[in-house]
Image (cartoon, rainbow, N blue to C red):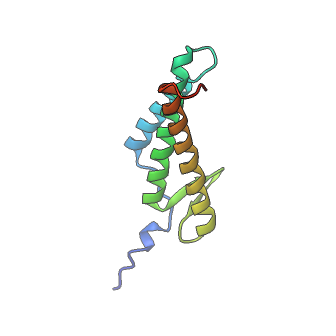
Amino acid sequence: MMFDPLSRHDEFEGYPTGRVLILAALFAAALYLSRSGSDVSSHEWGYLLFGGVMLGLTIMDARTGWAIVLYRPVNRSKEPTLYWTSIAISSALGLAAVVFSVGALLGYWSL
């Protein structure tokens, strides 16, 4: 009997539950802090949390080999172009949110 180690990655198993719950809670906090009626200084913290969540999800996508693109999961080995495009866009958005929010917190510009 031959064991194929790649066959266990053929089906999308979803994200690990504990990590997703933590990231979902951080995303909810980011939405709360960045809403239009909140204090101006809390907007930066909201965007910082949003960037952290985006980077966290990107790291999870890169480790699992699956990414969610709009409405469906994409496998790294079956659709590599769409997968890596998704990874690049989400990491760029997350990094931009973190950099610009840290710059705003330090007083280099305002959001």
Which part of the image, by quadrant, shows the N terminus? bottom left
100 vs 63, nearest the viewer: 100
Which part of the image, by quadrant, shows the C terminus? top right
Q: Does 47 sit left or right of 1 as displayed?
A: right
Tally the marks: 0
**Residue under the image location 57 percent in, 62 percent down:** 84
Image x and y of residue 93, in percent: 58, 45
101 vs 108, nearest the viewer: 108
Q: Is residue 46 above or below residue 20?
A: above
**Residue under the image location 45 percent in, 50 percent down:** 15
**Residue under the image location 35 percent in, 85 percent down:** 2
Q: Is residue 1 above or below residue 74?
A: below
Figure quadrant of residue 34? top right
Asked whether residue 27 appears in the rendered view, the answer is: no
Asked whether residue 52 appears in the rendered view, the answer is: yes
For this orientation, the residue located farthest to the bottom is 1
Image x and y of residue 53, in percent: 48, 39
Figure quadrant of residue 64? bottom left
**Residue under the image location 48 percent in, 26 percent down:** 105
